[in-house]
């Protein structure tokens, strides 16, 4: 069963906000063409990608200069995201949770 990735902002500009990711690929960056725009001085125009493969979520830095951490460890290639993972991009930190798409109401997800 497909799962959505819910990201709860715990520090930085997204504190208290939950962003739900349901697409197979989500580009995070500072430019208007990105799927998820983070306005942070440390976020690059094309910073990272969230992707789902076989019902598992991963994050991939899109630039060698991108600051991406999962549970305090730097990410330099594809890194799996688990329930409760802490994801830091620039100065913004999110806590990840996994939700069944069947449990979500139609149109109930937030889009940044």
Image (tube, rainbow, N blue to C red):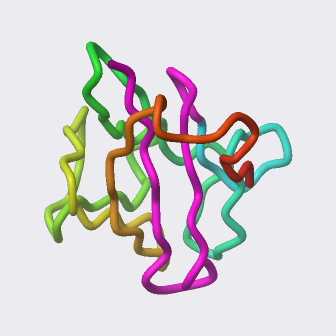
Judge left or right: residue 60 versus residue 47. Answer: left
Kindly give the residue lying farthest to the top in the view shown.
Answer: 54
Q: Position of residue 37 (x, y in %)?
A: 71, 55
Q: Quadrant of the N terminus?
A: top left
The C terminus: image quadrant: bottom right
Q: Is residue 73 left or right of residue 96?
A: left
Q: Residue at x 82, y 37 (%)?
A: 33
Residue nearer the viewer, 71 or 100: 100
Q: Does the stretch in magenta take in 109?
A: no
Q: Nearer the viewer, residue 14 or 28?
A: 14
Residue furthest to the right in view is: 32
Residue 32's place in the image compared with 84, above or below, is: above
Report x, y in % for residue 8: 46, 69
Seen at 25% across and 27% down, the residue is 56
In the shown orientation, is residue 41 left or right of residue 71? right
Q: Position of residue 40 (x, y in %)?
A: 64, 74
Residue at point 24%, 45% (across, down):
81
Q: Is residue 5 rendered magenta in the image?
A: yes
Q: Is residue 46 left or right of residue 96?
A: right
* Residue closest to the eye, 32 or 104: 104
Picture mark count:
0
Q: Which residues are the magenta region?
A: 1-26
**In the rendered image, the vertical position of residue 23 relative to residue 97, given as above or below:** above
Q: Position of residue 101 (x, y in %)?
A: 47, 32
- Residue at image location 48% in from the left, 43% down from the top: 48
């Amino acid at each position: 069963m497909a799962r959505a990735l819910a990201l709860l902002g715990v520090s930085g500009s997204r504190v208290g906000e939950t962003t739900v990711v349901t697409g197979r690929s989500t580009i995070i960056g500072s430019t208007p063409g990105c799927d998820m725009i983070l306005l942070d001085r440390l976020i690059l125009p094309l910073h990272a990608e969230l992707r789902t493969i076989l019902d598992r979520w991963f994050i991939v830095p899109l630039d060698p200069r991108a600051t991406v951490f999962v549970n305090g460890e730097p990410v330099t290639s594809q890194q799996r995201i688990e329930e409760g993972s802490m994801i830091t991009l620039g100065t913004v930190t999110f806590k990840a949770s996994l939700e069944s798409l069947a449990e979500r109401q139609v149109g109930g997800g937030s889009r940044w």
